[in-house]
Image (spheres, helix red, strand yellow):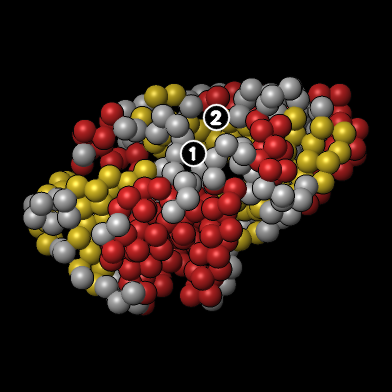
């Protein structure tokens, strides 16, 4: 089959990879560069972690995610996973860290527990008295997104995929299986896979009832000199406790120390608008992290990266079949870690036509 994939974030790159491996003719179309720094997949690094609440099936899906990344590393000839483990910090009863701990226990996945004093001894950037407890696990780390994207683009080109960059799809005709480019040129296919991230509603406006687009920003920081070594050795921090939905990536791969918070997101219908950081936005994100971080005013803002991404109401992933097109999104703020596995599952659905199975898997239901 000839399959056109629209959008070369991690979902599109992985779909193209899996389809090309199965002998299909693939055309992958990206409106920007690869990686596209404006895409959700275009930042330096993202977290992979087993930590999920017991009520979702995503903790189990992580096993398949690791397996798919391993297959990709074999193809690329090098791994882009820094398996440094993860840490969760609880500050209030019922906070996210507690939910993740219950999930790890329910799945029988081992964790190491410690109290606030021990947490601050191990991780001197933490303030002991604001930490109820912490737990760590080896089951997580950092994925190096920019390196993954550029290596995947090279692999795809070398494998005969027709890769069109700086090329925007203006419209998709699902019945005819044709995409029309900004230039007016049309490309016909047997099937179309749309992995357009936060731009998907431009192609399929009816999807605004299923997904909401948000803008957010993350901040890259230079820590005080005496805390640098601690950050270099730190695991990824999946949650810092309390209500800020805060996560931290230590320096890894091409990326430096990065703080991000779910509190800092706002509804934002136009993925291209407002992409320059606002004055003081980096400091604003940084300061959400006190407590449990100490001495935050000594952390210097190096860079602020804005991002547009979509969420479903229940924060799962989705697919919408539309005749010969399949629209897929693994986002809701936590989809990168499943990227390679999403690609393999999309290829299964394209070949079998079993979109329900794909939808169940994307929602982490038994599939
Ligand atoms: C701040 C932030 C932190 C996150 N942290 C994590 C994390 O730690 N761990 C994790 O697992 N996940 C995380 N996520 C989620 C993760 O980044 C996304 O789930 C994932 O990157 C989505 O990939 P995608 O390919 O579906 O979309 P995108 O990466 O947005 O890719 C869509 C691509 O389609 C292209 N495109 C769109 N429309 C067109 C068109 N008409 N023509 C041509 N090209 C088009 C875009 O340019 C873009 O490159 C985070 C997200 C954000 C925003």
Q: Residue at left 36%, top 53%?
A: 357
Is the CB of mark 1 within 8 Å of ligand 1?
Answer: yes
Tell me residue 310's x, y (percent): 39, 36
Mark 1, other Cα within 10 Å: few <14 / some 14–19 / many ≥20: some
Most foreground residue, 303 or 239: 239
Tell me residue 55's x, y (percent): 57, 37
The number of callouts visible is 2
Mark 2, other Cα within 10 Å: few <14 / some 14–19 / many ≥20: some
Quadrant in which the C terminus is drawn: bottom left
Per the image, label 1 sits on a secondary structure element best described as: loop
Please indicate whether residue 133 sits to the left or right of residue 20 in the image: right
Quadrant in which the N terminus is drawn: bottom left
Please indicate whether residue 274 sits to the left or right of residue 79 in the image: left
Per the image, label 2 sits on a secondary structure element best described as: helix
Q: Residue at left 38%, top 67%?
A: 18
Tell me residue 264's x, y (percent): 53, 25
Inter-mark Cα distance, 1 to 2: 9 Å
Tell me residue 211's x, y (percent): 34, 33
Q: Which residue is mark 2?
A: 262
Most foreground residue, 104 or 41: 104
Q: Which residue is mark 1?
A: 333
Most foreground residue, 95 or 286: 95
Q: Residue at left 28%, top 64%?
A: 352
Most foreground residue, 234 or 92: 92
For residue 245, which quarter of the picture?
A: top right
């Amino acid at each position: 089959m000839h399959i056109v994939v629209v959008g070369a974030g991690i979902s599109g790159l992985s779909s193209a990879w899996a389809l090309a491996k199965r002998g299909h003719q693939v055309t992958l179309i990206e409106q920007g560069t690869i990686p596209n720094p404006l895409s959700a997949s275009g930042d330096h690094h993202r977290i992979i972690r087993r930590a999920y609440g017991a009520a979702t099936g995503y903790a189990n899906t992580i096993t398949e995610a690791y397996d798919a990344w391993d297959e990709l590393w074999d193809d690329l000839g090098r791994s882009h996973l820094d398996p440094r483990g993860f840490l969760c910090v609880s500050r209030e009863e019922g906070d996210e860290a507690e939910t993740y701990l219950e999930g790890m226990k329910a799945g029988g996945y081992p964790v190491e527990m410690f109290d606030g004093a021990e947490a601050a001894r191990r991780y001197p950037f933490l303030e002991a008295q604001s930490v109820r407890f912490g737990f760590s696990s080896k089951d997580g780390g950092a994925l190096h997104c920019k390196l993954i994207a550029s290596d995947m683009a090279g692999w795809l080109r070398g494998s005969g995929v027709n890769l069109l960059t700086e090329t925007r799809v203006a419209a998709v005709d699902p019945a005819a299986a044709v995409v029309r480019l900004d230039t007016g040129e049309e490309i016909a296919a047997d099937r179309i896979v749309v992995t357009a991230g936060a731009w998907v509603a431009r192609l399929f406006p009816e999807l605004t009832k299923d997904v909401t687009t948000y803008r957010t920003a993350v901040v890259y920081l230079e820590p005080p000199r005496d805390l640098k070594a601690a950050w270099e050795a730190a695991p990824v921090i999946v949650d810092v406790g309390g209500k800020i939905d805060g996560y931290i990536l230590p320096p890894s791969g091409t990326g430096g120390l990065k703080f991000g918070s779910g509190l800092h997101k706002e509804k934002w219908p136009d993925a291209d608008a407002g992409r320059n950081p606002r004055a003081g936005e980096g400091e604003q994100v940084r300061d959400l992290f006190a407590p449990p971080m100490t001495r935050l005013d000594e952390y210097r803002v190096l860079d602020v990266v804005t991002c547009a991404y979509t969420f479903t109401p229940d924060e799962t992933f989705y697919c919408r079949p539309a005749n010969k097109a399949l629209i897929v999104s693994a986002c809701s703020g936590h989809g990168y870690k499943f990227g390679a596995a999403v690609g393999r599952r999309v290829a299964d659905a394209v070949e079998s036509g079993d979109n329900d199975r794909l939808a169940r898997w994307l929602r982490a239901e038994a599939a």
